[in-house]
Image (cartoon, rainbow, N blue to C red):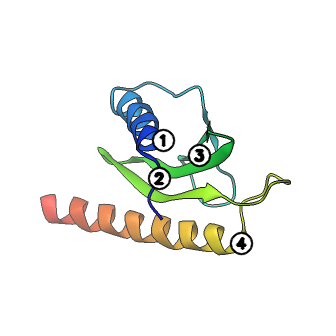
Amino acid sequence: MAFPEEVRKLIGDELQLIQFGGIPKDAKIFKGVGSGVIEIALKYDKEAYRCIQAVQLGERIYILHAFQKKAKKGISTPKQDVDLIKQRYKEAKELESHEKTREH
């Protein structure tokens, strides 16, 4: 499912801020996955959107997952989404490690 254009723009603005060393006001630590993983939570047109990313992996920003929150109550991210985020975090760390060894 594609995000609405305005949501993509808002998330893009937040990611650009991170690229230049800033911290978005909508960002918070995403616990239980790994070091440096943050969540950007946006509300748009009465819907909630999430962008989960890992920073501090070399000079790259890895987007681990982006999704529209479906639950109307409760704040926890569904286990299926958390499992996907964990898998992608592991893959990002492996990729970054591979890139470092390639540079030397």
Q: CA distance from mark 4 to mark 2?
A: 21 Å
Disc 3 element: strand
- At x 57%, y 45%, the residue is 38
Q: Which residue is mark 3?
A: 39
- At x 71%, y 72%, the residue is 79
Residue 28 in view (yes/no): yes
- Verify CB contact (< 8 Å) between mark 4 and mark 3: no
Q: Which residue is mark 4?
A: 79
Give the number of marks: 4
Closer to us: 68 or 100: 68
Q: CA distance from mark 3 to mark 2?
A: 16 Å
| Quadrant where the image shows the C terminus | bottom left
Q: Which residue is mark 1?
A: 7
Q: Earlier in the sequence, mark 4 or mark 2?
A: 2
Q: Earlier in the sequence, mark 3 or mark 2?
A: 2
Mark 2 is surrounded, within 10 Å at the Cα level, by few (under 14), some (14 to 19) or many (20 or more) other residues, namely few
Residue 101, picture quadrant: bottom left
Whether 19 is drawn above or below 71: the answer is above
Q: CA distance from mark 1 to mark 2?
A: 6 Å
Q: Earlier in the sequence, mark 1 or mark 3?
A: 1
Tag nearer the camera, 1 or 3: 1
Disc 4 element: helix
Q: CA distance from mark 1 to mark 3?
A: 15 Å
In the rendered image, residue 68, in percent from the top left (x then y), is placed at 60, 56
- At x 51%, y 73%, the residue is 87
In the rendered image, residue 89, in percent from the top left (x then y), is placed at 48, 64
Closer to us: 4 or 23: 4
Disc 1 element: helix
Closer to us: 86 or 44: 44
Labelled disc at residue 3: 2
